[in-house]
Amino acid sequence: MTDALLPAAPQPLEKEGDGYFRKGCNPLAQTGRSKLQNQRAALNQQILKAVRMRTGAENLLKAATNQKVREQVRLELSFLNSDLQMLKEELEGLNISVGVYQSTEEAFTIPLIPLGLKETKDVDFSVVLKDFILEHYSEDSYLYEDEIADLVDLRQACRTPSRDEAGVELLMSYFIQLGFVESRFFPPTRQMGILFTWYDSLTGVPVSQQNLLLEKASILFNIGALYTQIGTRCNRQTEAGLQSAVDAFQRAAGVLNYLKETFTHTPSYDMSPAMLSVLVKMMLAQAQESTFEKICLSGIQNEFFMLVKVAQEAAKVGEVYRQLHTAMNQEPVKENIPYSWASLACVKAHHYEALAHYFTATLLIDHRLKPGTDEDHQEKCLSQLYDHMPEGMTPLATLKSVHQRQQLGKSHLCRAVTHHEESVREASLCKKLRNIEVLQEVLSAAHQRSRLKYTQLREDYDLLNLIDVPDIIYVDCKWLTVSEVIKLLKSFGQNDIEMKVVSLLDATSSMVSADAPWQQIATWSEVSVSPAPEVFIRTPASCLHL
């Protein structure tokens, strides 16, 4: 059982002598997450041993000239490669152990994927920093023993951060301290002799460097990973919990994207630009999924415009997971991305595409134009569901014809059943996903619902009359910079334009957080334009140049 759901409020900094840094979690505490991290650390050591033995065998194979010795080395090398592959598969199993990180509340929802924290070895700064203080600053290094001890303690605490905002603050405080330490004690022209070792979170292979770049990048990665764990832990049965999950996954994506753009030459594979791009896509996809769940939380009313909105939102989630699955199967990330992650992305892509077709079928079959109905509005909504209408059909004619609505609706149900069957099949092909009971239950329930509705409407000649329906699309907004807005307004004859910020936050946006660090879309602004008729334009704050 994990600890309490709600994150603890940040505690005041404790004073213990001259030490003033927060402490991490007790590394000996037998929580589910600590056990998982301990297993990860043990696997990392076994992988390190196997890698060293394989390297030695490869070197011996190159140096040996005796044919019998070479055959024995080749045999040993094949065993080592087999052992290493089994260890990496065991590490992949830990990476898909999503149950440990989920909310403690019972939920009939598909699990989300968190990132595991990178493991590191102990580092003692004291001797090197004391020597540098004495040599470079000509001061008695013993005057700074307590401060150096605080720095060592802070790094040790960062190995076991708590899974809440206090844990993020702990990692951030160490990252900030590293900036100060680097500017004062790590000159670019000199190696300080401190070796920082971090283990790849996906492959378990260790990477070592003598500069602080690897240390800073790894701490940033762990900040992003901690946000993913906070996001998966949120209670997805409440609106506040889902909004917190959206916020956490957006923050994780922002941190990982900042890492990708700032630290471009990290030797660890899980922090390579290609892998970080995939991880950013995965976090944004999970944020989009949480947004969809938030819309559906209060129940989906069987009403035309509500069903249009839900169908488009489901199509958007399916689209982002389809793009994620494609990215996961591209070189060079394909070899090291966990197979279970790629399988789950494919399962979710089919699942949400099926939901989009199901809700579209429902709005076509269950709703008819009645006297007093806003025909123009319904026609516009139906036309926006597709990139193009099926051949021989127009939105208004389809809305008015009961036969066309039934025919088109059953075709969508057929597509929904096909996608559901594919999602169930993909989940059954992955051993790790087969063991996630709630995933199997959600997929099975959605599949049975679509099949039941299609069975109730099916007729003998349906197979001859089914329409090749197009995919459901999500109508997204096109963002304009302020200069583009001014140019557009001037084209309508508005020459004297004065721009001013009216508010710094649009609280109605479900995918925006005002205080999320490193977010590319962090805040919104409403900009008023005068003179002329009153015009309000929503633009990303990052585009404003006032």
Image (spheres, rainbow, N blue to C red):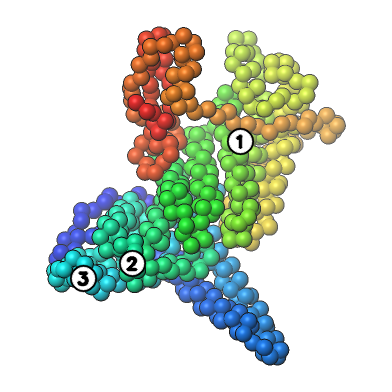
In the image, which disc is placed on residue 234?
none
Label 2, residues with CA under 10 Å away: few <14, some 14-19, many ≥20: few
- The residue indicated by pointer 2 is 190
Q: Looking at the image, which is closer to me, 454 or 421?
A: 421
**Residue at the front extreme of this rendering:** 189
Q: Is 78 displayed left or right of 37 in the figure?
A: right
Q: Looking at the image, which is closer to me, 304 or 54?
A: 54
- The residue indicated by pointer 1 is 315
Q: Give the vertical position of 430 relative to 191 (above or below).
A: above
The Cα atoms of the two marked residues, 1 and 3, are separated by 64 Å
The Cα atoms of the two marked residues, 1 and 2, are separated by 54 Å
**Percent of width and height locating residue 149:** 22, 68
Q: Are marks 1 and 3 in contact (CB under 8 Å)?
A: no
Mark 1 vs 3, N-terminal side: 3
Q: Residue at x 42, y 50 (%)?
A: 262
Residue type, mark 1 in image = Ala
